[in-house]
Image (cartoon, rainbow, N blue to C red):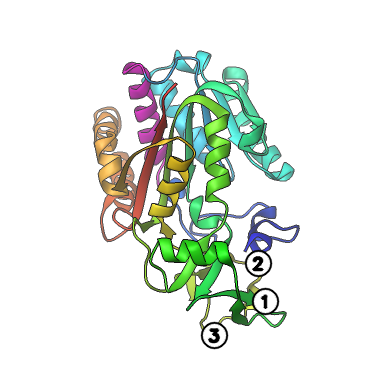
Amino acid sequence: MTEWLYGEQGYYSTYKTIGKEGDFYTAVSTSKFFGGTIAKHIISLVDEGFLDKDATICEIGAHHGYFMADLIEFIYTLRPELLQSFSFVIVERFDALQEQQRNYLNECFGDAITLSHVKSLSELRVDSAFFIANEIFDAFACELFYKGKTGRVEEDGNVEFDVDNEWVSEKAAKYHKNLGEIAVGYEEFAKEMAGAAKKFEFMSFDYGEMMARPYFSLRVYDKHKVYPFFDEELNRQEAFGSTDITYDVTFEHVKDAYEEAGVTFIELKAQMTALINMGILDLLEMLRVHVENNIYKQELEKVKTLILPEFLGERFKMIRFRKEG
């Protein structure tokens, strides 16, 4: 899966369009009020005294840079003086995507912000930070587990479950999985973040549940069509590297990884509840007062996609952690 997504010929090694013209939608591609709501939350952290006014705002996996741009735009609207004191960082491993993000954000804001890139959290050392990631944990490598055996992908794309892997078996037992995906790398990622800042809050949005699901959820997205990984119609050799591959997150595994790294778990909420609690409806009301009704209605429809249960509101979850200084 690592090679499929991040190898030299991997899916994310080059820029990919997200949204109607791409393979899938994200909350970021749906509405700029997603980033706006996170901006409002960041300001509330400053007001309550948890986040320093000279904190580092760090996005992990920024793709084109749309989310960071939305977040900065709303900080400027709501509390413009913070743009002078905040530092903005993007964690991005690919040089080409760093350049794409840098160019886009420079076009948007020029020298009004301080922006830098790192290739991993291990390069970052700051005092106060807010970390944000959208759909990151579903893109970690995973092992496939079935009845005590770990899967092995053969050259023809078929999977044989004949490998004994003690670590995978221990995780499967811990999370009560007889079959399914066992994520690899959560523990290292949590440790890197714990070492990157003396004090921070981390928020991430992804799909999944706290407890493991009792089936394989691994699937491929291609032009908004979904193919289960073990679907007979899926040519896994042709799909390799040219399509997005993902699986449902077991948030209990994420929680355990961060707690083992000394970071405190705060909450897990449906995206709908999280965005409403952080004030997305307040932002919409601010918009309604200042724009024509047709523009307000357009943005309202986009926000509905973020929060209504039949769209992204219930399936996606927000998980939040804190490390106290």
Task: State the residue position of label 2.
Answer: 242
Q: Vertical placement of 235 versus 287: above or below?
A: below
Q: Earlier in the sequence, mark 3 or mark 2?
A: 3
Q: Residue at x 31, y 59 (%)?
A: 311
For the residue labelled by badge 1, is the local secondary structure a helix, a strand or a loop?
Answer: helix
Q: Dominant secondary structure of the magenta stretch?
A: helix
The quadrant in which residue 158 appears is bottom right
Q: Earlier in the sequence, mark 3 or mark 1?
A: 3
Task: State the residue position of label 3.
Answer: 233
Residue 111: x %, y % from top left: 62, 19
Crowdedness of circle 1 by 10 Å Cα count: few (<14), some, many (20+)?
few
As for residue 12 lying within the magenta part, the answer is no
Q: CA distance from mark 3 to mark 1?
A: 12 Å
Magenta-colored span: 30-49
Q: Residue at x 53, y 54 (%)?
A: 18
As for residue 31 lying within the magenta part, the answer is yes
In the image, what residue type sits under mark 1? Glu
Tell me whether the residue at label 3 lies in contact with that at label 2, contact meaning CB atoms closer than 8 angstroms.
no
In the image, what residue type sits under mark 3? Glu
Residue 267: x %, y % from top left: 31, 41
Task: State the residue position of label 1.
Answer: 238
Mark seen at residue 191: none
